[in-house]
């Protein structure tokens, strides 16, 4: 009987030790920064922000293709910018190219938010190209055309926000990799 009591007591102590160590280790894990989930949230937010750019670009594309002039309500200069030779490339409205780019960012961001790592690697390239294009177009508005379009400025702001989000998301992923090593 003494041996049975001892083995029951040993089992209880073993179980108690196991529970304590598991609870403590799971609490320690929950206190560690969760870089992966932060990156996923940033990618999700980037997908949402890209929809703003997509709507903006689609509006400008429809107006361009229908031949209607876009009315500026905040700044003056939409007509000058959107009727300039820089508004299209070989007959294709620049806004249509922007809409395609924003749709690509939306798609890649959504897939990255669901953990597809290959899209998370491609996304910074696409957003980087968009950012450089935005800088060029901003330069054209400021120094060549000497007029600003509020819809183009919105697109520039969206691209800037996307750039920041994607850079932060990539940093979170890299921090996660460093923690795993």
Image (cartoon, rainbow, N blue to C red):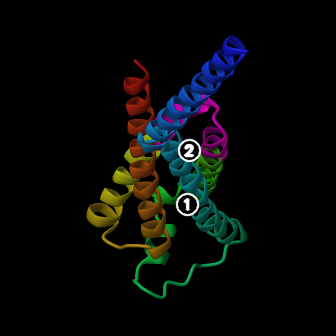
Name the residue at 47% across, 61% down.
158
Q: Is residue 43 located in the magenta-colored stretch of the structure?
A: no
Question: Looking at the figure, which quarter contains the C terminus?
Answer: top left
Viewer-side residue, 95 vs 162: 162
Q: How far from the left and from the top, in percent, is residue 137?
A: 39, 56
Element class at badge 2: helix
Give the magenta-colored segment's residue range. Answer: 107-127
Quadrant where the N terminus lies?
top right
Q: Is residue 125 magenta?
A: yes
Decide which of 110, 99 is in the foreground and name it.
110
Q: Give me the residue at 44% from left, 50% from top.
A: 165
Residue 49's tag is 1
The mark lying in front, picked from 2 and 1, is: 2
In the picture shown, does residue 80 fall above or below 65? below
Q: Position of residue 106 (x, y in %)?
A: 63, 49
Say if 164 sits above or below 174 in the image. Answer: below
User: What residue did someone put label 2 on?
Assistant: 40
Element at badge 1?
helix
In the rendered structure, find residue 74 and report the number of the disc placed on it.
none
- Percent x, y of residue 35: 45, 39
Q: In the rendered view, does 123 fall on the left or right side of 137?
A: right
In this view, 94 is above or below 143 = above
Q: Residue furthest front?
A: 1
| Most distant residue in the left direction | 143
Can you give x and y, in whole percent of width and height, for residue 159 in the image? 45, 55
Q: Earlier in the sequence, mark 2 or mark 1?
A: 2
Residue for point 42% across, 68% down: 153
Q: Quadrant of residue 75?
A: bottom left
Packing grade of label 2 (10 A; few <14, some 14-19, many >=20) is: many
Distance between the alpha carbons at the discs numbered 2 and 1: 14 Å
């Amino acid at each position: 009987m003494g041996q049975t009591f001892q083995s029951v007591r040993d089992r209880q102590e073993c179980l108690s030790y196991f529970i304590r160590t598991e609870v403590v280790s799971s609490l320690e894990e929950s206190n560690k920064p969760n870089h992966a989930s932060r990156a996923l949230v940033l990618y999700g937010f980037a997908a949402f922000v890209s929809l703003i750019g997509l709507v903006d670009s689609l509006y400008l594309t429809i107006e361009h293709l229908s031949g209607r002039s876009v009315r500026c309500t905040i700044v003056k200069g939409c007509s000058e910018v959107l009727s300039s030779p820089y508004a299209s490339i070989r007959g294709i409205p620049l806004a249509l190219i922007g809409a395609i780019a924003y749709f690509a960012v939306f798609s890649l961001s959504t897939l990255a938010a669901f953990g597809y790592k290959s899209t998370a690697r491609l996304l910074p390239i696409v957003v980087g190209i968009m950012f450089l294009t935005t800088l060029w177009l901003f330069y054209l508005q400021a120094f060549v055309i000497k007029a600003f379009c509020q819809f183009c400025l919105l697109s520039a702001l969206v691209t800037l926000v996307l750039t920041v989000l994607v850079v932060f998301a990539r940093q979170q992923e890299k921090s996660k990799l460093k923690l795993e090593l």
